[in-house]
Image: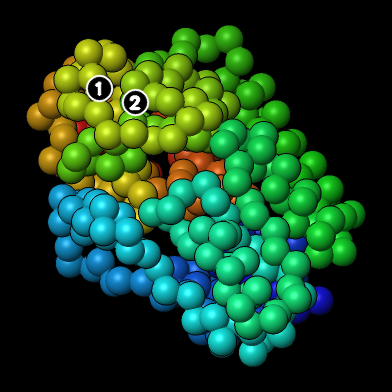
Amino acid sequence: MRLVSLLPSATEIVYALGLGDDLVGVTFECDEPARARVDKAVVVAGRDTTGMTPAEIDAYVRDRIAAGEDLYTLHARALAGLDPDLILTQDLCRVCALPAGHVDEALDHLGCRADVLSLDPHTLDEVLDTIVAVGARAGVPDRAARLVAGLRGRLAAIASAVRGRPQPRVAVVEWVDPPFTAGHWVPDLVRAAGGEPVAARPGGRSVQTTWPEFVDAAPDVVLVAPCGYDLDGAAAQARTVVPLFPDAAVWAIDANGLVVRPGPRLVDGVAAIAAILHPEAVPRPAGQIRPVGP
């Protein structure tokens, strides 16, 4: 089966299922594993925001959406030329990836008969369900079942390690300028790690808020996990919010690797958050989290 992934998390799922050799097309943001963007055809492009501040990126996104313009460009003819059997896409977030409707329209126009699977999870359980769905549609349901069973086993081990311990109040900041709450599956990660999510929107979209909302929620721990950033980028932004939370521990976390992409590595994210909240019970991972203040 010839597979095309139009979002980074789906690329991670494909490789986790051992289907990397069947993947023929990816997006410019598919960087895990690193070879995906090198070995495969890139069929979705977008603006390189390197060097832009969070405020500048936010303004760019708002301006494009207000003008009815797309944030991503689908190379439709290149996609059709790959002759895919299955295309993995999404309708969850217009800012994060190309919407499925755009793909359907392009395929209809070009007469391409590929199957399109839209992955739109809102909770951690639904993320695990998408792995099962990809495995079923790609013809490897047993692999998907084993992968998900292993991930659930890891979650159960973390739950056992933190059971009965105090649950710190945790605020996750998904963007700093302007501030955005944690939404979708992110509050689930906090709960699975033995914390109480505050200033959050469980199962719903991350929305713009104010710093007073975060401060008034009285978090014990603030996790800065800006969408699209690795650990170094998150740490740079976390330092700007430390003065707002003199009574809380502020940590930066590798957002792309552990928090915002709905794929198998979210379980790594739960383990990393648990190590922050309960360091005596869960070992701290290397290179994924960083204390910033106070």
Q: In the picture, residue 73 is in which quadrant?
A: bottom left
Q: Residue furthest front?
A: 109
> Which residue is drawn at the image coordinates 67% and 68% (left, top)?
87
Helix, strand or loop status at disc 1? helix
Q: With respect to residue 283, does 59 lie above or below? A: below
Give the spatial CA distance, label 2 vs label 1: 7 Å
Q: With respect to residue 294, does 73 lie above or below? A: below
Q: Is residue 180 left or right of residue 157?
A: left
Q: In the picture, residue 10 is in which quadrant?
A: bottom right
- Please state which amino acid type lies under the numbered disc 1: Phe
> Which residue is drawn at the image coordinates 33% and 63% (left, top)?
69
Q: Residues within 10 Å of mark 2 (few under 14, many from 20)?
A: many
* Residue 204 locus on image (x, y percent): 48, 30
* Residue 60 locus on image (x, y percent): 21, 59
* Residue 92 locus on image (x, y percent): 52, 47
Q: With respect to residue 31, does 75 lie above or below? A: below
The residue that label 2 is drawn on is 171
Q: Please say whether residue 173 is visible from this viewpoint.
A: no
> Which residue is drawn at the image coordinates 48% and 39% (left, top)?
272
Q: Confirm or deny contact between disc 2 and disc 1 (CB under 8 A).
A: yes
Q: Nearer the viewer, residue 18 or 133?
A: 133
Pointer 2 or 1: first along the chain: 2
The residue that label 1 is drawn on is 214
Q: Nearer the viewer, residue 43 or 106?
A: 106
- Please state which amino acid type lies under the numbered disc 2: Ala
Q: How is the image coloured?
A: rainbow
